[in-house]
Amino acid sequence: MRIIGTGSALPKKVVTNEMIAQFLDTSDEWISTRTGIKSRHVITDEKLEDLGAEAVMKALEMSGLQASDIDLFIASNVVSEYGTPGISCVVAAKVGLNCPMFDINCACPGFVYALDMAEAYYKAGKVKNVLIACIEEPTRMVSWEDRSTCVLFGDGAGAVVLTEGDNIKGTKLHSEPDIDKIWMTRALTDSPYVTVKEPDVALQMKGREVFRFAVNACTNGVKDLLDEVGIKKEDVSWFMVHQANKRILDAIVDYMKVPQERCPMNIQDHGNSSSASCPILLDECNRKGMFKKGDIIVFSAFGAGLLSGAAVIEW
Ligand code: COA
């Protein structure tokens, strides 16, 4: 497949580190030196599906396709207000899509997993045009009384439209199932047959262990994938790495021995927007005109699960 359109949408409200320090025992100094984050977009009264619809419409507009041209819609989302239907259906109803669609919940690497699936459907001869939208509101998963998690995240949506082509050169997905490192739970409705009350638990994370997983999974995943497809890292034009923490990105740049400028970052303005992070970064770089035909772009992302994945495409 080949990406022919990108789009993104962000909540209007920008929350700086200083604003958080007004109600939590934290500081701009701590947050920016540990994470690289200065501010993030935070959902207020907007609806997540409206952000999703905006990102989708922008990607469709750039692609030159209509909603009716799309054969498959894959939405990546960790949580939304809807238990059912999936956010794919909620967004589809807004933008007039009526193709087969489904949600995936692969946490932060969702975009890479969706690319892998889009390519598999295409190679099976089942689709010609695919829409992927990663639509996330992690600021509604954290406790805003927990300084160790709430400062890290931001909300947003990123979308891509793909059509026929052999520009996805390879994907590599990886898992190390472990639900103890990043997790949250939501209570379900009461039932007379369930006697143990399930608690609502906001996002919990073992930061240092996730940091280690992220660096290993990303560096090994990218190296293995490039070896598999026979592309040298020197020939990669851009490394689009999940924007979780600037120190993770620095560690990857260091380990991979690639120039910093080939690893674009927007974490300072967005924080970690889960699976939306890669497509938002892609759209921002694309709209700045950074990519030229033939550029090799590597995506790499990691997160809860623990899951990680990498994809390499030609622009
Ligand atoms: N402001 C001030 N102090 C804070 C703080 C905040 N926002 N958050 C945590 N602290 C404190 C801790 O309470 C701890 O204090 P103590 O030493 O008195 O107990 C101290 O800072 C160090 O905490 P620690 O968690 O060990 O810090 P760290 O250097 O590991 O940095 C992360 C924390 C979360 C920034 C870092 O581990 C990280 O980025 N991990 C990866 C997270 C990630 O990317 N998750 C998403 C993957 S998709």
Image: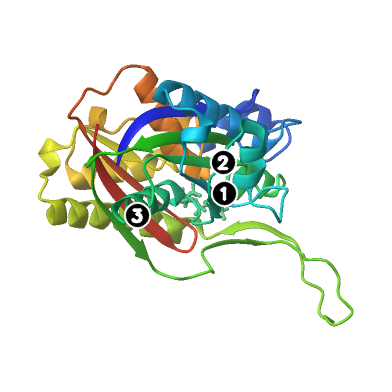
Amino acid type of the residue tagged 2 in the rendering: Ile
Give me the residue at 68% from left, 45% from top: 140
Residue 206: percent from the left, percent from the top? 52, 60
Tell me the CA gap for discs 2 and 1: 5 Å
> Label 2 neighbourhood size at 10 Å, few (<14), some (14-19), many (20+)?
many
Residue 260: percent from the left, percent from the top? 25, 31
Residue 31: percent from the left, percent from the top? 53, 37
Frontmost residue, 199 versus 175: 175
Residue 76: percent from the left, percent from the top? 52, 48
Amino acid type of the residue tagged 3 in the rendering: Gly
Give me the residue at 70% from left, 55% from top: 84
Q: Which residue is mark 2?
A: 135
Check mark 1 vs ligand 1: CB closer than 8 Å? yes or no. no
- Are circles 2 and 1 on residues that touch, CB within 8 Å? yes
Q: Which residue is mark 1?
A: 77
Q: Residue 9: in sight, yes or no?
A: no
Q: Is residue 197 left or right of residue 299?
A: right
Q: Which residue is mark 3?
A: 309
Q: Secondary structure at mark 1?
A: loop
Above or below, 202 against 4 in this view is below
Quadrant of the rendering where the N terminus is positioned: top left
Q: Residue 5: in sight, yes or no?
A: yes
Residue 144, located in which quarter of the rendered image? top right
Mark 2 or mark 3: whose residue is earlier in sequence = 2
Amino acid type of the residue tagged 1 in the rendering: Asn
